[in-house]
């Protein structure tokens, strides 16, 4: 396998300066808004097929997938698109033809194709979480900023009208100052069986390419095509799977970005598989005239205990905001204010957030020189880092003060390998 050169890797790790600025996108080549983009899609099965459909109004020029069976639906719908197994070969042959790239691979293989795309000056849409580690996430955010490229993290619920209304109510001060938020994913998925027997690799799958930068191991149907998300080497558990969606609500409503401290608890840490439950406590600083915020994240069956304490339902909801004047219980696109008697006859504030033209359209327009997409990496990067820091604290078994500028858990050197991973031979990125 071809490894990235040191020069390429250095380009991918721009220094963390201009922390979380908001640059305008710079199209890879001048174009009119009515001119179509040439888009390459990496990972076109499963969730990738949905993303292909989302950008299918543009020119689809290349598909890349190491699993022909998973990719079959997209291949059938778009028979004239050039097909590849290895994204590196795709870029080697078609780099000049590509304007923008969509990455929809498993978590552990987001970083390398995303890095290659940004290095080549291509606009980027990437599935959540942005990367498999905090360090990878920061590298991608910094490079996209430096190159002034149009980006979008795939937290598509952000475009729902109902979420905008939740944000407007919180920001109007209807429930007063918010100092505490509880957010959750209801469920107990995790800790799958650890494979013990080698299985033959299916003929439709290039297993070595699927592994990418992860350590070699025999193929198992437990890993691929779906349960990979519950093994640490490939996925980020339910926290990584849903955290970017759920925490998008308080991030947007409260303008929080970088936690000062992170603590986590849950069942005993398994070295291979992600847990069935987890609780994370984040402390965020004051922002302007807004007070500090304590944000709790739960991966828990039937939601967090505070719902039962206050007699509130978990079903259909993902966040509870506690304010000085009341509470707001929210799903992704609905909300209810409590105590109900205090908010009888409540009139929502005027609408101030423009309607999204569509989540994919936001990114496509940004690629053509329009305004940045709402979940561009300047927003989605800190969101992803926060989510992944919950996993770091849980696996470390200790809370820590977070040095965001230097990507360090203060006084916890054991966290370094969880923050910045190592890659197997042929996939190294030396920065």
Image (cartoon, grey):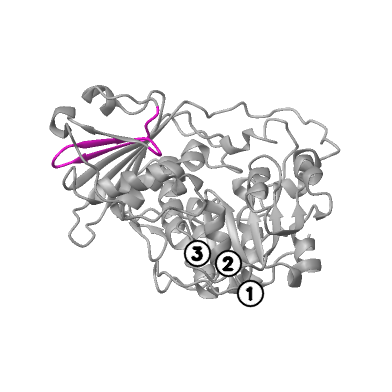
- Callout 2: few (<14), some (14-19), or many (20+) C-alpha neighbours within 10 Å? many
Counting from the top left corner in percent of width and height, residue 3 is at 73, 64
Q: CA distance from mark 1 to mark 2?
A: 9 Å
Counting from the top left corner in percent of width and height, residue 111 is at 60, 57
Mark 1 or 3: in front is: 1
Q: Secondary structure at mark 2?
A: helix
Residue that numbered label 1 is attached to: 31
The furthest residue to the right: 203
Q: For the point 57% across and 42% down, which residue is it?
A: 235
Mark closer to the chain start, 1 or 3: 1
Q: Quadrant of the N terminus?
A: bottom right
Relative height, residue 404 to residue 184 (above, below) = below
Q: Which quadrant of the view contains residue 424?
A: bottom right
**Would you say the residues marked 1 and 3 are in contact, meaning their CB atoms lie under 8 Å apart?**
no
Tell which of 411 and 218 is nearer to you. 218
Magenta stretch containing residue 154, yes or no?
no
Q: Which residues are magenta?
A: 316-333
Tell which of 81 and 66 is nearer to you. 81
Residue that numbered label 3 is attached to: 141
Residue that numbered label 2 is attached to: 367
- Callout 3: few (<14), some (14-19), or many (20+) C-alpha neighbours within 10 Å? many
- Callout 1: few (<14), some (14-19), or many (20+) C-alpha neighbours within 10 Å? few
Mark 1 or 2: in front is: 1
**Would you say the residues marked 1 and 2 are in contact, meaning their CB atoms lie under 8 Å apart?**
no
Q: Secondary structure at mark 1?
A: loop
Q: Is residue 272 visible?
A: no
Q: Is residue 418 visible?
A: yes
């Amino acid at each position: 396998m071809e490894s990235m050169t040191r020069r390429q890797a250095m380009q991918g790790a721009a220094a963390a300066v201009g922390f979380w600025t908001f640059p305008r996108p710079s199209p890879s080549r001048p174009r009119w808004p009515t001119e179509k983009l040439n888009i390459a899609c990496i990972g076109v099965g499963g969730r990738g097929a949905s993303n292909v459909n989302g950008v299918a109004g543009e020119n689809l020029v290349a598909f890349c997938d190491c699993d022909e069976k998973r990719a079959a639906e997209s291949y059938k719908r778009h028979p004239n698109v050039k097909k590849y197994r290895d994204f590196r070969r795709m870029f080697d042959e078609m780099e000049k033809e590509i304007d923008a790239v969509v990455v929809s691979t498993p978590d552990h293989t987001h970083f390398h194709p995303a890095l290659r795309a940004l290095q080549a000056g291509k606009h980027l849409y990437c599935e959540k979480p942005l990367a498999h580690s905090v360090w990878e996430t920061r590298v991608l955010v910094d490079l996209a900023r430096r190159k002034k490229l149009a980006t979008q993290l795939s937290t598509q619920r952000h475009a729902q009208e109902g979420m905008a209304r939740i944000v407007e109510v919180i920001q109007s001060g209807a429930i007063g100052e918010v100092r505490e938020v509880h957010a959750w994913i209801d469920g107990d998925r995790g800790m799958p069986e650890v494979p013990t027997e080698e299985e033959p690799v299916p003929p439709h799958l290039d297993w070595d390419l699927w592994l990418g930068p992860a350590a070699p191991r025999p193929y198992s149907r437990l890993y691929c095509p779906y349960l990979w998300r519950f093994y640490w080497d490939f996925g980020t558990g339910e926290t990584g799977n849903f955290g970017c969606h759920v925490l998008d609500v308080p991030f947007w409503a409260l303008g929080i970005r970088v936690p000062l401290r992170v603590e986590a608890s849950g069942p005993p840490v398994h070295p291979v598989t992600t847990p069935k439950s987890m609780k994370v406590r984040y402390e965020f600083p004051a922002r302007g005239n807004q007070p500090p915020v304590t944000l709790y994240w739960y991966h828990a069956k039937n939601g967090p205990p505070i719902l039962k304490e206050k007699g509130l339902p978990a079903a259909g909801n993902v966040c509870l905001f506690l304010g000085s004047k009341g509470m707001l219980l929210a799903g992704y696109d609905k909300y209810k204010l409590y105590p109900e008697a205090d908010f009888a006859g409540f009139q929502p504030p005027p609408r101030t957030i423009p309607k999204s033209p569509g989540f994919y359209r936001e990114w496509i327009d940004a690629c053509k020189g329009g305004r940045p997409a709402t979940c561009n990496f300047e927003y989605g990067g800190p969101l992803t880092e926060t989510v992944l820091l919950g996993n770091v604290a849980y696996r470390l078994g200790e809370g820590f003060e977070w040095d965001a500028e230097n990507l360090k858990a203060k006084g916890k050197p054991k966290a370094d390998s969880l923050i910045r991973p190592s890659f197997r031979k042929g996939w190294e990125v030396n920065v």
